[in-house]
Image (tube, grey):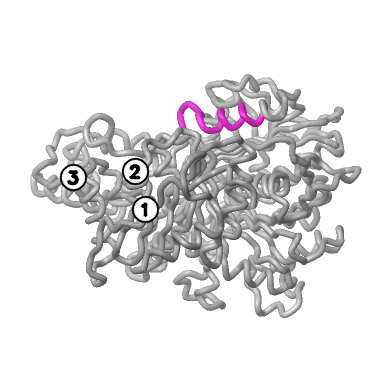
Amino acid sequence: MKTDVFIAGDCIISPLGMGSKLNFEQLLTGETAIAPVDDATLADHRIHAARIADHQWIGKIRNASGYTRLETLFILAIQQLIDAHSIPVDRRTLVLLSTTKGNVSLLHNPEAQFPENRIYLAEMAHAIQHYFGFANAPITISNACISGALALSVARQLLQYSDTYDQALVVGGDEISKFIVSGFEAFQALSDGRCRPFDRDRNGLNLGEAIAAAYVTKKATDDAVRIKAAASFNDANHISGPSRTGEGLYRSIREAMQLAGEPMLDFISAHGTATVYNDEMEAIALHRAGLSDTPLHSLKAYYGHTLGASGLLETILGIHSLRANRLIPSLGFQHTGTSKPLNLITQPTERPLGTFLKTASGFGGCNIAMIFEKV
Amino acid sequence: MDVPSHYIQSYCTIRDRSIALNGTTWLKMDSSTTLADFLKSAYRQLDIDYPKFHKMDGLCKAIFIATELMTRDSGPYPSDTALIFSNRSSSYLSDNKHALGIFNTENATASPATFVYTLPNIALGEISIRHRLHSENVFFIFDRYSPEFLVPYTQAALDDKKLANAISGWTEISGHTCDLLLYYIGKSGSVPHTVAQLKRIYNEHE
Amino acid sequence: MSELTQELKAKIITQLNLEDLTVDDLDDHTPLFGDGLGLDSIDALELIVMLDKSYGIKLSDPKEGRKVFETVQTMADFIEANRK
């Protein structure tokens, strides 16, 4: 029996602050978390990135010294959701963690403060399980930059088609480390200033940090949002280069739209990393899907690319957009910079909103499209 | 249990320095062989021309070999075959290599060809390219082989999209050891897709 | 000059894991990308790292790379002209 699945609660910890409502309001005022960062532990030169400040997490949990920075942030977000929605920690609750690299900053790092076995994601999951006493070991998803959205999709599938769980906590997060900065740098993917998604003059992405958490349940509350459809397809083209035809993303969008009954979309929350090839690929896929005219934003110029959190972070902000009936502008966009023009949102417009599409794409050729609607 | 809707059509195990297809040994080498030499020998024994194989990391190579063997047994994978994989160490082999490179005090280097493999799902991309699979991919990280989670999830994913086929399993490659079980699921066969069967298959390879 | 091209061929084969090739298989004028050797965008990035680490030449414009990496010969010419 197919039951509907809803997002009934959410939490965001980002450099813009703690709490998703606060984060949403910051976006409407045009606030950005991206700033110049001069930190020799990350790179030997200045980068532009969005980092969570020490005061946001240090000393905020029990037995604080037993948990890494990233684990502490995950715990803080989960605690918020448990407190707000009285979520039980028993067998009926599944915790899904989404991260690309977890505690990888500890690996071979001469300054690491924790034993190296903590780089294993199962160890991180275990630490989080232990903190709350969850009956089930948290399950981790590590599927590149679609991890956050994919974890939501996996939670929906499990709640809808298996009777193992009643609710899920889906939590995504990654932190900026030398490991990640040096890799993106080697890919020549980092922007020399604040990124400009879909803009003519875009020249790369910014890395960002955020923790995003969603309470996924079969019970609809008044302000819940329904996970209407999800679809995910691989490009089967190249392990790092975006497909020139946008094949996997196009198929994901088409199937999600079909599964959702071809709804009218009020807006699209794109991936929009602001690299030359990614944004072009998305424009082509959206054009092929006949969605070039739908209002669209990328939130990467507010938060940077938050990797394992991004799909979830941007979904949650999309949900707040629905609730508030306000469109979030796509920061950093001025001139059309893709071969197929898109309808970028430039003003925080107020209008009735009911349904939106979230997309994400990542290394390995993975893509996902999800549709959310107000209850 | 009700009548199962899906069956295990073929499976491949790689344990240390031996590879078996459907329980029958296909390659066995001395335990002193390095992982790299072992995987290269397996590639040579496949007798195919796929130069990209040599660019892959150990995780991708092992997964590539297993999926290559299974398709020889069960025929080409349909393009919508879902890929649902899991392991403990994620992409540790490449993570280790990248971290050693960037923290090298003599000559710190970040290699793009290493960094790209520091995500476990790259392996899913590699086999999608090889077998032309435009399908759903998920890479889970567990503490240990967990058919108790994988079976209900795989079933849910197949039911959700009304799919007939998936490749699923456990692909733990770290340092020198290999502990891999991949299986191909379809609508017909004699071995039902159940936790009990998957425990049996996992344990049959010594 | 031919010493440099030989050295480059060996480096390209090891760095890019072109396992099935030897230095003798690689002609000075074979296109490295496209229909020639079939290298891809990750290989191009890897060659940029190689120029930097082995010859101290930094290449930040990927468009420039396309010309430099056309063949082993064009790479050698570029290195000769820019080497410190």
Magenta span dominant secondary structure: helix
Between C5 and B188, the residue placed more toward the observer is B188
Residue topped by disc 1: B22
Which residue is pictured at 65% across the width and 63% down the height? A138
Residue nearer the viewer, B193 or A217: B193
Q: Secondary structure at mark 3?
A: helix
Determine the residue positioned at 72% across, 43% down.
Answer: A315
Q: Say which element carries label 1.
A: loop
What's the CA distance linking mark 1 and mark 3?
56 Å
- In the displayed structure image, the side of residue A226 where residue A336 appears, left or right: left
B109 up-or-down from C24: above or below? below
Q: Is residue A188 visible?
A: no
Label 1 amino acid?
Answer: Asn
Q: Which residues are magenta?
A: A243-256
Q: Give the label, 1 or 3, closer to the camera.
A: 1
The circle on residue C80 is: 3
Task: Report in which chain the residue with disc 3 lies.
Answer: C
Q: Are marks 2 and 1 on the same chain?
A: yes
* Location of residue B46 in the rendering, given as x and y in whole percent from the top left corner: 24, 47
